[in-house]
Every structure is written in structure tokens, then in C-alpha cells.
Amino acid sequence: MHMDAFLWMFLPVFVAAGSALLSFYIMQARMEVAIARERETLAEARATINSQKITMEERIKATEETTKRLAMDELMQDIRVEERSYVRESKSLNASKRSMVMQERLFFRNIPLSNWIEHEMVVEEGHDLDQLPKESVFSTPTIHQGEERLAVSKFLHDMSAPQTASIMPARIPAFGAQ
């Protein structure tokens, strides 16, 4: 009997210990499930943040490139070429020389970026102004009506027109020259 009394006395303790272990493992499993859900939510949030960060960086780069392109376009619109031309006649005892002088310089807004670059083209008797070289220091090659040639200055283009081909321009003194 003595054994039965001990058995009945310790049986509830064993059942309580077993129930405690069982509830511990069940609660441990529930906590692991809750932690897994939180980690999944955290991973989704991190992925969303990373994708938004990448998108934002791409937008910033695109905005910077657009801004740089617009700034460069504005700069290029402010750069211009000023041209002027006149006919120079130099007479000596033996010969008379007639030449057309074309001067060009670069400007940024109203600030000159270069000095006057002068081209002197000799005009001889019997030659027309259409036969003069039509080059500019600052021009780039362009394709014009199916053939490749250099861009022509406004003055030479106007002079080659039929209504003004026979008119010679008057002498325009250089800036500061007497």
C-alpha cells in the first residue's frame, strides 16, 4: 500500500510536469510561427524599401541627366558666331589688288570668346564672287541638297543670290580702326 500511496501522490505531479512540457513546446512552436510571420513581414518591407530606393536613385539620375542636358542646350543657344565682311582695295604703283575680307568671332551672350579671325580672299578681274571659297572657321560640315559641303556665311550666301550678285559691299571699318 505504501507504494500505491506514493503513486497516487506523485501521479498528479508527473501529469502536471508533462502538461507543463507539452504546453511549453506548443507555446514555443507558436512563438516560432509568430517570429516567422514577423520575419516575412520584415523581409517584404525591406524588399519594398530597397525597390523604392532603387527607383528613387534612377529617378534622381534621370533628373540630373535631364537637367545637365537642358543646361547644355541653354549654353549652346547662348553661343553664337558674329560675322562681318568688307572689300579691301590696296593700290600700288604697279598693281591694284582687290580682296574680300571676312571676319568671324565667337560670342557667349554678349561676351566675346575669341578674337576676330580674318579670312582674306583675293578677287581678280573677271572672277565672280561665287567662285570664292565659302568656308568658315567655326562652321561644321553639313549635308545640303544631297551633296556634302561646308556651311556658307550669310554674306556670301546673300551675295550669290541673283538680285545682289553685282553689288559689292561698302568698306566697313574694323572695331577701333580708323
Image (spheres, rainbow, N blue to C red):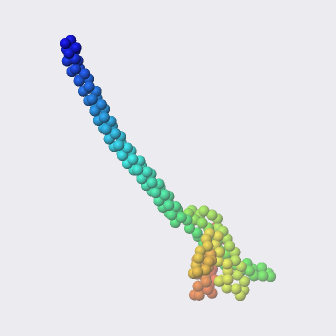
Q: Residue at x 58, y 80 (%)?
A: 146
Left or right: 32 with respect to 124? left
Q: Residue at x 57, y 81 (%)?
A: 145
**Image location (x, y in percent) of residue 132:** 67, 80
**Image-quadrant location for residue 171:** bottom right
**Image location (x, y in percent) of residue 149:** 62, 77
Q: Which of 78 and 169 is in front in this view?
A: 78
Q: How many marks?
A: 0
Q: Can residue 67 be seen in this view?
A: no
Q: Which residue is drawn at 61% across and 86% down?
A: 165
**Image location (x, y in percent) of residue 96:** 75, 82
Q: In this view, does 150 lie above or below 27?
A: below
**Image-quadrant location for residue 86:** bottom right
Left or right: 133 with respect to 4? right
Q: Residue at x 70, y 81 (%)?
A: 123
**Image-quadrant location for residue 81:** bottom right
**Image location (x, y in percent) of residue 10:** 23, 18
Q: Nearer the viewer, residue 72 or 87?
A: 72
Left or right: 37 with respect to 166? left
Q: Quadrant of the N terminus?
A: top left
Q: Is residue 76 visible?
A: yes
Q: In this view, does 20 lie above or below 6?
A: below
Q: In which quarter of the image is the C terminus?
A: bottom right
Q: Nearer the viewer, residue 178 or 33?
A: 33
Which residue occupies the extreme front position in the image?
Answer: 1
Which residue occupies the extreme right position in the image?
Answer: 94
